[in-house]
Image (cartoon, rainbow, N blue to C red):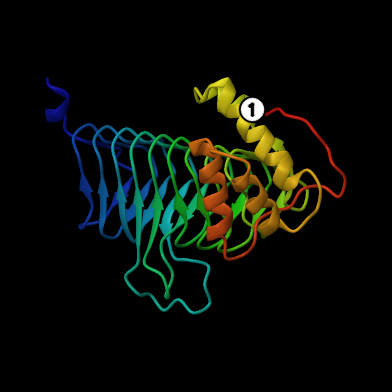
Amino acid sequence: MPPESVPPRVHPSAVVGPEVELSPGVEVGPFCLLDGRIRIGARTRLIGHVTVLGHTEIGADNVIHPTAVLGDEPQDLDYSGAPRRLRIGDRNVFREGSTVHRGCEKGDITIVGDDNFVMQNAHIAHDCRIGNRIIIGGGTLLAGWVQVGDRALVSGNCVVHQFTRIGRLALTRGGCRMSRDIPPFCIVDGDHTLRAINSIGLRRAGVKTPVISALRHAFMALFGVRQNLKLAMERLEASGPLAPEVAELLAFIRESKRGVAFGPYQSREGEGGE
């Protein structure tokens, strides 16, 4: 039987509401609850004890582990039941106890892209924008309106303040506390303190050595010591042509509304990844 014609399989103990649409090959395991305007894409698997609520769209080939909750109401005291949404792409993994909430009263939609890995007990709050190929470690909490760029790695037990942005290919070490934007390609720890360029992550992403060297130079010029960041950016731009990735780093800083994370009080060279 062709994959597109395999009917969905629903365990007898699962509760599936009348507005739920299941694509071919979907598996709904024991004791799942699906209630609301829900669409689930082909071959997505709900292992068991999964809850999906609200106006939620889930793409194809996702795997959702027991006790995950997707599309529940936002943790927003002003929320009055307005029809807000959650949209999840393809090939994501949501591990045990992870939660993703739909948009809040003043928002609209929470978006999770493709090929992400959300580990146990991680939380993605209302109106977040999660890109592609991101790892979110166990116990990490993303508050409302947080944005995470493609291929970022947010390690376990991190806490991210609302409206904070985490740039592409950034790495946050375990237990970070972030209320300032984290520039792309950087490693951060502690209280949003930048430490180095994420050299290992960049290499794994196929970024060439000269580009990594240019990013390392830019990092030291901007964050090697505490200084006036605007002036440091102007000096860097005046030094000659910039690699596209360095230009991306500078553009991210300029677009920040919360301000970006800062370097350590003393110059601390290094590189690495986890």
Q: Quadrant of residue 108?
A: bottom left
Measured from the top left, where is residue 124 in percent x and y? 52, 53
Image location (x, y in percent) of residue 175 = 73, 45
| In this picture, residue 80 sits left or right of residue 4 | right
Q: Position of residue 140 (x, y in %)?
A: 63, 48
Residue tagged 1: 213
The image quarter in which residue 266 lies: top right
Who is closer to the viewer here, 151 or 7?
151
Residue 225 position in % (x across, y down): 81, 47
Tell me which residue sits at (77%, 30%) in the image: 270
The reply, left or right, for residue 30 in relation to residue 170 is left
For the N terminus, which image quadrant? top left
Q: Nearer the viewer, residue 262 or 92?
A: 262
Q: Residue at x 70, y 52 (%)?
A: 232
| Above or below: residue 145 compared with residue 262 | below
Number of labels in the image equals: 1
